[in-house]
Image (cartoon, coloured by chain):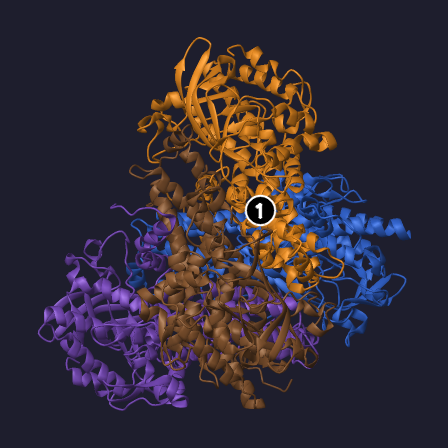
Chain colours: A orange, B blue, C brown, D purple
Amino acid sequence: MRDTEELWRDFARSIRTAEDYIASLRGRRMNIFFMGEHVSEPVDHPVIRPSINAMAETYRLASERPQLATAHSDIAGSAVNRFLHVPIKPGDLVGKHEMQRELGRRTGTCFQRCVGLDAISTCHSITFDIDASTGTDYHHRFLTFLRRAQTANVVIGGAMTDPKGDRSKPPHQQSDPDLFLRVVRRDEDGIYVSGAKMHQTGAVNSHWLIFMPTMRMTEADRDWSVVGAVRVDAPGLTYIVGRQTNDTRIVDGGRMDAGNAQFAGQEALIVFDNVFVPREHVFMDGEWQYASTIVERFTTYHRSSYVCKTGLGDVLIGAAATAADHNGVSNASHIRDKLVEMTHLNETIYSSCMAGAHQAKPMASGAYVNDEMLSNVAKHNVTRFPYEIARLAQDIAGGLIVTMPSEKDLQNNEVGPLIRKFLQGRDGIEVIDRMRILRLIENMTIGRNAVGYLTESLHGAGSPQAQRVQIARAMKVEEKKSLAKKLAGVSERPG
Amino acid sequence: MRDTEELWRDFARSIRTAEDYIASLRGRRMNIFFMGEHVSEPVDHPVIRPSINAMAETYRLASERPQLATAHSDIAGSAVNRFLHVPIKPGDLVGKHEMQRELGRRTGTCFQRCVGLDAISTCHSITFDIDASTGTDYHHRFLTFLRRAQTANVVIGGAMTDPKGDRSKPPHQQSDPDLFLRVVRRDEDGIYVSGAKMHQTGAVNSHWLIFMPTMRMTEADRDWSVVGAVRVDAPGLTYIVGRQTNDTRIVDGGRMDAGNAQFAGQEALIVFDNVFVPREHVFMDGEWQYASTIVERFTTYHRSSYVCKTGLGDVLIGAAATAADHNGVSNASHIRDKLVEMTHLNETIYSSCMAGAHQAKPMASGAYVNDEMLSNVAKHNVTRFPYEIARLAQDIAGGLIVTMPSEKDLQNNEVGPLIRKFLQGRDGIEVIDRMRILRLIENMTIGRNAVGYLTESLHGAGSPQAQRVQIARAMKVEEKKSLAKKLAGVSERPG
Amino acid sequence: MRDTEELWRDFARSIRTAEDYIASLRGRRMNIFFMGEHVSEPVDHPVIRPSINAMAETYRLASERPQLATAHSDIAGSAVNRFLHVPIKPGDLVGKHEMQRELGRRTGTCFQRCVGLDAISTCHSITFDIDASTGTDYHHRFLTFLRRAQTANVVIGGAMTDPKGDRSKPPHQQSDPDLFLRVVRRDEDGIYVSGAKMHQTGAVNSHWLIFMPTMRMTEADRDWSVVGAVRVDAPGLTYIVGRQTNDTRIVDGGRMDAGNAQFAGQEALIVFDNVFVPREHVFMDGEWQYASTIVERFTTYHRSSYVCKTGLGDVLIGAAATAADHNGVSNASHIRDKLVEMTHLNETIYSSCMAGAHQAKPMASGAYVNDEMLSNVAKHNVTRFPYEIARLAQDIAGGLIVTMPSEKDLQNNEVGPLIRKFLQGRDGIEVIDRMRILRLIENMTIGRNAVGYLTESLHGAGSPQAQRVQIARAMKVEEKKSLAKKLAGVSERPG
Amino acid sequence: MRDTEELWRDFARSIRTAEDYIASLRGRRMNIFFMGEHVSEPVDHPVIRPSINAMAETYRLASERPQLATAHSDIAGSAVNRFLHVPIKPGDLVGKHEMQRELGRRTGTCFQRCVGLDAISTCHSITFDIDASTGTDYHHRFLTFLRRAQTANVVIGGAMTDPKGDRSKPPHQQSDPDLFLRVVRRDEDGIYVSGAKMHQTGAVNSHWLIFMPTMRMTEADRDWSVVGAVRVDAPGLTYIVGRQTNDTRIVDGGRMDAGNAQFAGQEALIVFDNVFVPREHVFMDGEWQYASTIVERFTTYHRSSYVCKTGLGDVLIGAAATAADHNGVSNASHIRDKLVEMTHLNETIYSSCMAGAHQAKPMASGAYVNDEMLSNVAKHNVTRFPYEIARLAQDIAGGLIVTMPSEKDLQNNEVGPLIRKFLQGRDGIEVIDRMRILRLIENMTIGRNAVGYLTESLHGAGSPQAQRVQIARAMKVEEKKSLAKKLAGVSERPG
């Protein structure tokens, strides 16, 4: 498959609906493993399928609410799915965040399509900048790629995090050079890359992957300073899907035990073994000076993408309020107060994300990027508040979320009736509905979707310390010292 | 002074500069008390003067940075001070908040002019709404008043908080009817009001006052449902300026002991005794149904005005960083980390305020008001984070902020040299500069401007519980329950 | 089995070792269900077994460190397992808490034997008090029971939490009278009880159960005011073991995926259907006035028993520190600082528990009970700090805890080598050891033992609001008002 | 005054009562400065007197409740004031902490006598240890000194904190050698010391001072490694009393404006200029190896002494509850909840302090010292919780605490009646009583005693980072790693 045209031939028919999308995933020949076994058809795998369903909602929303989930792209010359639209005004980022919250509300989990959007947004300006200073033609290549992707309406995954090995060393000093993804060979048609990318969100559910460097590079790291796009079924790619808390509940328990049977997230380890990338899909090769800028722009976009967690917060607040109803305590002042606190924290996250979108700044390519300080502040709040919201949800829900019998017990002839008798809440509430809501709260606070709501809120788009480093860099402390000195009557002196 | 024209004659010459403004305050015949004594000329009172200086900065900023601190008003048909400009697009609120932060950075205290702006913004839409439903001409009256105020460039104070007496009773059931401001008499020229307004920010430093009801009214509270404007020197008005922490430092210590000698806030108790309000300056009289809307709109505007505290936060972060420099510990990781935390909290406040401005909503009159949820969330963060920022500033500064000798000791021949010897910090730092910065931190965290930075952040524009009530009202819990039920597979039933 | 002697015949041989204990559980004819299936032999059930192992450690510790885990009982006239020893001096409670922390450190989970200890401690003083005022002989009966239990060294479970149904109604007004456990029949040999107890810790792993009322009773609730002891295999008892997060990992994944393969907690719903309790094992029957005292004493004991979570905290701090070692970042200042914060919070919990033990108060029976205020304060800290400790552990560990491949992938010939290659951390660390530690952190923060470390820390021994009610009751606000009034110069007046 | 006997002659008559104590302070010839003026008689100085009153309460309590505030000393062979009693069993430390809380409740401020107690407790074991290893006779000298002090019942101040200058350098490398207190000369009768001690609590109100090194010393710092006792009126000593927030309120306002007119704290800068210390009063001279141990023991004692702040917390909780009464809102659920939160935080501090006392460890001299980890944890909580308690008190009290008119306004014929009319709260409450309570809350949260309740809670006995360093040292991380590795199945290997 050395011909770029051929690579795109499979995507000639645009994906329109959620159903189209799911159909598009069938029959690919990918090398996927989960729990020690090769997965021949992920679409039919009971543990993987909920993550496909979540991704499919990004298509469904575009069908149902095009104003929210599509945007006109000058590149395609038509309306495209907003997940394929490079933001060219603050309103595009505002719209993106509103869409992300809505998808969080619909799925209660990670719908996996943001990384790719943030990757293309980053590539747009970076390829422009590199070309401007070095005379390369990356930007044109990238626009061609993006136009095709927009027209085909494919899912693009973004792949950034390398294994890193010994964190005190740059790529070229690692004992194993593959611990950062790198170019192992170049020929006239393109390049060959090897290495791995970790924690790859929705990897199996994507059509294409854009890989990018994960940190600042030095001149000696030229071969590791590479950006490009490959099909997910390119020869040489292997996927190992990670285990999630309660991932097998859907199999061993049932829909109720799963809590949210329909939707889940997905992260995989992707191994690249001598994977060919045709020249037209190489968007950077060796321009090591741009690696840190790529990371900064990408994280600035992506940290604000965590606004999606406020959609999950909406679901969890609603679930807690429903549990309180079922227990007949929704009027207790302490319950009401906890719902207010959950809302306050959730909206605080929302406000940091939205402020950074409204105050986005333009770049040379014409693309806009969120305000850097506010985007870091937003993500930093995301590393804290969902944990407290989850704790409050558990507080309201009661201990039953972790001691409740299984759906199979409920179906059992001997103990089912006992459960119905003794788990009765407020009059008029079906026991099974009470149990369903409690399982949803378990799912989001200590179950499968707690992976996305909590731990990935902590580490996705950079761990807390990464934000603190950025905040330190952006906090203009010298300017603030001047303000203080002026008011205190301290004369400014050099040094 | 029954003739409105006459009331405005004194303001025929527009106030242009900070100096004009200060001059305009001289020679008024107001009944002002402070610490048991009549204040004949507040401009020359050493404790009151810093609060006048802070207000004057609102004029200075307009001169120095007109783009930031003025705006074109269709009402006046010209550029006006932004503190007199009713917002008619989200950008006006964004600009307002940027101006407020800048003034916080310049003064390190409350500059007192926001209440009036939020009062006129509220009156604009409320008078419009009342007229639309009852056929009154309040809106026209109000626009006439505002045009004059804009042209004259006067300071308008907003007066809302009544003494309230027994909080479990509405105005008409209070044993003393004056515990809420009310109309005591009406004649053909206007109305006469009696009562009091508490905690009035910058009252003595204003030219005009707009008074408004402080809470929801019932039909029996018609006489208490009144809005109008009076000159601050109207017969029947008495002002008792409140004591602030360390208010007399400037007198008994000196500039250094004061910490921020130039700027301070001001709050006064205003007593109205049969004060005449000419008909042209009455903007509501008896329309009790609108009282709660007035309060909601005003607080939605005013809660976001607390963005000014991020300007104070900038000063305090700068002061703490300078203190760390002076102590030679600015590179210690825990110091750096505390500065980052302070910045993170400060910018979180900023982001909630700005998001609510960007997402402002239009009203029938054409005026825009901040998003209600976000404005309440913003203010709720203001009731928490400045306390933690202040604690961290004290942590960085060290205990000396509360054990340090006086400026007079420093000037004393015997102990001055001892202080210079033993308070020496890092080489090259003047002891007096070190002391000045520590006094500024004292000023903002446990001194005069802590009044504004902490306690007023807690209670201004409504105490924390008031925001929680609003958040509860706006949190759409039924909608959130539906989201949860859908994901959990719970069927929606009536009830 | 109407004869008490006969009921004890099976326990004639004292249980000495952990192995004895496990053997003692075999071959009982209990009606146990898990995931819809009858469990014929819990000892051999892979999901239940880890909870038995945890309980067995209470025996092992007594063998290995008798000074810590046994005490001389005047009742038995010999040394007994400390879990069967009624505290008769503050030192007994101090020793109990040290033992509990140590068992937390050994198991990393809930070892399930505290409820029974806290139940017998409560019965000791309550039976004494009832007898003293009403002339019954409950105390003698109880001491006889306890002596046998001590000699046999059995596990006693404590059963308190009723289903409660409509929480706004007392037992006698519930539509279904069984929603609180109650006496359904009395004959000359004893009583018959029906109802259920929820969230019963270690129920299946116990030999005997003591049931007690769960809240304040009224005179009309006499039949619900009952305390007694039954064998876990008494006819009429049914157990439904609750599902826990990742409970089946040990089956579908393997030891590594389980995180802590050896130990886990257990909670079950116990249904009582006309269960006979011989008179000698009835310790209260109808004395409704004592129900609230039972609850208060039991919760005062039991809230401090949550000191065990500091043992789990020790494990989690150690796991996070090890993960940092593996990543080569143990010297980073922010990592070190997070370990300090975790320790600070953990020791704060410890200190509240220990202070309440040292300041225990004697009761009429001679038994001692923890200081009520401090015990509530301790538990209230337990409802907060483990969540923050867990968040910090996840922060240090990194996102891999939720995206890591399965043990089965590691064993797979194709992907196993890839995992070994790319998950390599600091030199000299085995990849499998790195994975094991990360799985342990998953286990304690979002996996099976997070059930005990987090959610049960929130709800066990009463939810947060229950502690707040107790703190409100014990906070002596009138006394504190007097202190303030005296210093402020406010005269005290009646009312 | 080279003769030790002579130095003690003035103290021949034991101080018995609070009145005796105050009398004992009169007529000393000390070189004291405050606000640039020499203070001839501190007892009569209106700003200093409240701090003397607070100290006097340590005598009054001993008279009124000898069981609480005295203890039998084997050194004196009689009962002595507990502030002069070296703890020789855990119960002594428990008793000490109960006394400290009670004095906090009585004074609402820092009563200043703890530093001296913690200094003598430290000297007891340190002199013993030095003698044991080096054959000196410091312990005997110290016991002789202490016996005299106990018999005379004097106030001993402890002086530790040196100015430190450039914090990156040890004493012998400072450009000015006086930046750490040091021996400047030795003769056959004793030594001469120069330097300064900062933030000296209650210095002016003491009779004797014990000075000690402030940090780890090196061999080159021998001359700075010195411990000794001097009379506060020894030639060469100068005191500069620090300014406190609102210190002059008592002068410029009146008793009400002061908030707590009777009691306050005190800190001074003490300068030593060639001060003679007779050999009998030298307790260490040159044994630099012991300097760090002195600091560790002293801080371990002293950090727990901050239990006194729970007494202040009691007052503040009472004041807030009274303010709520006055406002007629004491039954509002959010008010009640805030009082519970304040109590919970206050008792958490108490429990950490008490646990460390109960679990005190003996040293070679027979003296006991608090558990090191728990004492650091206790103090670390003190650096956080009083700030939150203060914030909640302000929340409950309302904004009036910072906008209220002066007492002099209340006394004014014109505005006094207006204040009485408009500040009326709930029926039956005197306006002046309402104002008094609000002034007390101001005093403790943003006024004079906020100095002690907040800032000194942060920095006294070591700033937050000092506790974190100690916690890091004591947290046994290797032991915790072993626990985790064992449960995770990780084999322990060297390194």
Q: What number of labels is visible?
A: 1
From this viewpoint, which residue is outermost toward the left? D188
Q: Position of residue D36 (x, y in %)?
A: 37, 68
The amino acid type found where label 1 is placed reads Tyr
For the point 24% across and 68% down, which residue is it? D212
Residue at (65, 56) in percent of width and height: A414
Q: Compared with residue A151, is residue D195 higher up or lower down, i.e. above or below?
A: below
Q: Nearer the viewer, residue D468 or D483?
A: D483
Task: Give the camera-side residue of A488 and C392.
Answer: C392
Question: Which image quadrant: the C terminus of chain A?
Answer: top left
Q: Mark 1 Cα within 10 Å, few/some/many (few <14, many 20+)? A: many
Is residue D470 depicted above or below C74 in this figure? above
In percent of width and height, residue D373 lies at 34, 64
Q: Is residue B79 left or right of residue A193?
A: right
Disc 1: which residue: B350
Q: Position of residue D348 (x, y in %)?
A: 46, 68
Report x, y in % for residue A63. Answer: 72, 29
Q: Residue reaching furthest top?
A: A188
Residue A154 is at least partly visible in this image: no
- Can residue A17 be seen in the rendering of this structure? yes
Q: Nearer the viewer, residue A175 or D309?
A: A175
In this view, A183 is above or below C82: above
As drawn, is C169 to the left or to the right of C443? right
Q: Output the chain of dot 1.
A: B
Left or right of A215: which side holds B50? right
Assign a secondary structure to mark 1. helix
Quarter of image, res C469: bottom right
